[in-house]
Amino acid sequence: MEHTRSSSLPPVTLVLGGARSGKSTHAEKLATGTLFGGLPRQAVYIATAQAGDVEMATRIMAHRARRGGGWTTIEEPLKLAVAIQGAAAPRQPILVDCLTLWLSNLMHAGADLDEAADELVRSLEGLASPVLFVSNEVGLGIVPETPLGRAFRDAQGRLNMRMAERADRVILMTAGLPLTLKDRPAPRG
């Protein structure tokens, strides 16, 4: 079954980068079509962050303020596949920000990480909406000191590889500059 998709976005985009690399801002501009000065289109923002402390609450408020009111926001820290399926609508992009916090939430909940990743990848098949994922590239820094930190870094690396394999477009952000690592053309339809 063929679905109508946004003409400028492939079915699945992964935007990777380090902390403060510009990945969220770039993904937001891709989702709304404003990267090159176009008129904004409606998009859905699926937020995986939880305001567990004052600093995180402040970060969430800053993200909301930057995005403005043109977004439909869904807060879902764990059931990402279900949220994506529920938000899908023809030609309406979905931005998931971010896979790193989602993975952290899953680890804290004691979830099966491989099963959750499988469910996420399956949820993307035949979806009417293009989906953009934001994720941290955590493998470029020092080796974490604790076993939990190393387990998280390894799980994040596996998740990023899995999503990059599935994605049609993969962008690496560094110092606010995008580098396209993979770009498979969107299907015509």
Image (cartoon, grey):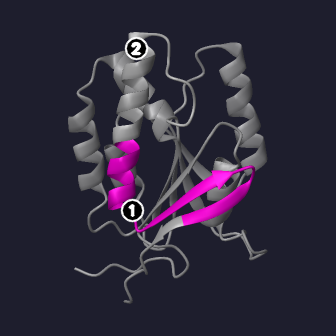
Q: Secondary structure at mark 2?
A: helix
Q: Is residue 14 left or right of residue 147?
A: right
According to the picture, the residue beneath numbered tag 1 turns out to be 167
Q: Residue at (39%, 62%) from the top-left corner?
A: 167
Foreground residue, 182 or 71? 182
Q: How many marks?
A: 2
Q: Is residue 103 visible?
A: yes
Q: Is residue 97 visible?
A: no
According to the picture, the residue beneath numbered tag 2 turns out to be 148
Q: Amino acid at mark 2?
A: Leu
- Residue 184, compared with residue 102, is above or below; it is below
- Residue 128, compared with residue 51, is above or below; it is below
Q: Secondary structure at mark 1?
A: loop
The answer for how far apart the CA atoms under marks 2 and 1 are is: 28 Å
Badge 2 local density, few (<14 within 10 Å), some, or many (20+)? few
Q: Is residue 77 left or right of residue 43?
A: left
| Picture coordinates of residue 183, whole percent (x, y) | 47, 73
Q: Is residue 175 magenta?
A: yes
Which residue is the extreme one toward the top? 146
| Picture coordinates of residue 39, whole percent (x, y) | 74, 75
Which residue is the extreme one toward the bottom? 189
Q: What residue span does the magenta drawing correspond to? A: 159-180
Q: Residue at (20%, 37%) from the top-left corner?
A: 115
Foreground residue, 70 or 93? 93
Q: Is residue 155 magenta?
A: no
Label 2 with label 1: CB-CB less than 8 Å: no
Q: Residue at (55%, 37%) from the top-left corner?
A: 140
Q: Residue at (55%, 60%) from the top-left corner?
A: 171
